[in-house]
Image: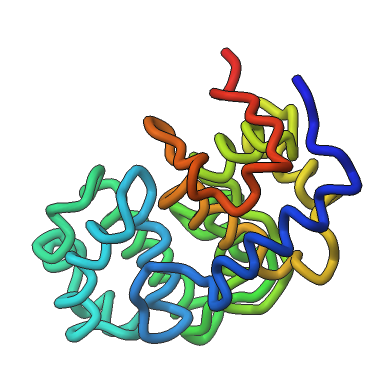
Amino acid sequence: MKLLETDNIDLFFERLAAAHPEPGTELDFTNTYTLLVAVVLSAQMTDRGVNKATGPLFERVSTPREMLELGEDGLKDYVKSVNLYPTKARHIIALSRILVEEFAGKVPSTREELERLPGVGRKTANVMLNVAFGQPTMPVDTHVLRLSFRAGLSAGKNPRAVEADLLAVVPERYAQDAHHVLLLHGRYVCTARAPGCDVCPVNDVCPKNGVLPE
């Protein structure tokens, strides 16, 4: 595959940053804990679908203690429109109990502690570290994975490899918001089925590698 030329990487992120001047998660949340709940629910779901479920939920619940009071069955009633909701509800109740018993109801701010929580893998931990705690991590979802290959930012075929490549090539001044602008670009412009090359702000520097290889 053809990688994006080093001299063009800065220009690539400069233009994406200009196209998305206020990048951020499209998940609705009210505090760090509800962000964690929303991110756990977002696996294999659109943000819009998660927000539809969490709008009423977060009017009722905003802390781990309140979630435990609601209970697993009560939580399921709110999130039954979410894919894999029985498993996700079980994880959310379990992680809420750990937060109450071991962290005084607070969401921890280290990767090691976050990944100890049920339902929290590397991508979810990266989202929390970035959005909630301001760390320049690189969550890799399907949009970022696909776009990174197509744009020649990474030859990696799995999220961990792409994460490592992006952390190595993204200019430091764009690192905090890089995954947001990549995700938004992949979601709304460089889509899987019909890439909008005619309106793409990086069209002239993109190697256009096509789809992720098998």
The one nearer the camera, 127 or 182, is 182
Residue found at the far top of this picture: 214
Q: Position of residue 164 (x, y in %)?
A: 78, 43
* Residue drawn where x is 45% and y is 42% of the image: 196
In the figure, residue 89 lies in which quadrant? bottom left
* Residue drawn where x is 74% and y is 28% of the image: 155
In the figure, residue 213 lies in which quadrant? top right
Residue found at the far left of this picture: 77
Residue found at the far right of this picture: 7
Horizontal placement of 22 versus 51: left or right?
right
In what quadrant of the picture does the N terminus appear? top right
Residue 209 vs 68, above or below: the answer is above
Residue 3 vs 34, above or below: the answer is above
Horizontal placement of 202 versus 75: left or right?
right
The one nearer the camera, 17 or 26, is 17
In the figure, residue 154 lies in which quadrant? top right
Q: Position of residue 214 (x, y in %)?
A: 57, 13
Chosen colour scheme: rainbow
* Residue drawn where x is 33% and y is 83% of the image: 65
The one nearer the camera, 157 or 3, is 3
Q: Position of residue 111 (x, y in %)?
A: 68, 62
Horizontal placement of 164 versus 111: left or right?
right
Q: Position of residue 59 (x, y in %)?
A: 19, 85
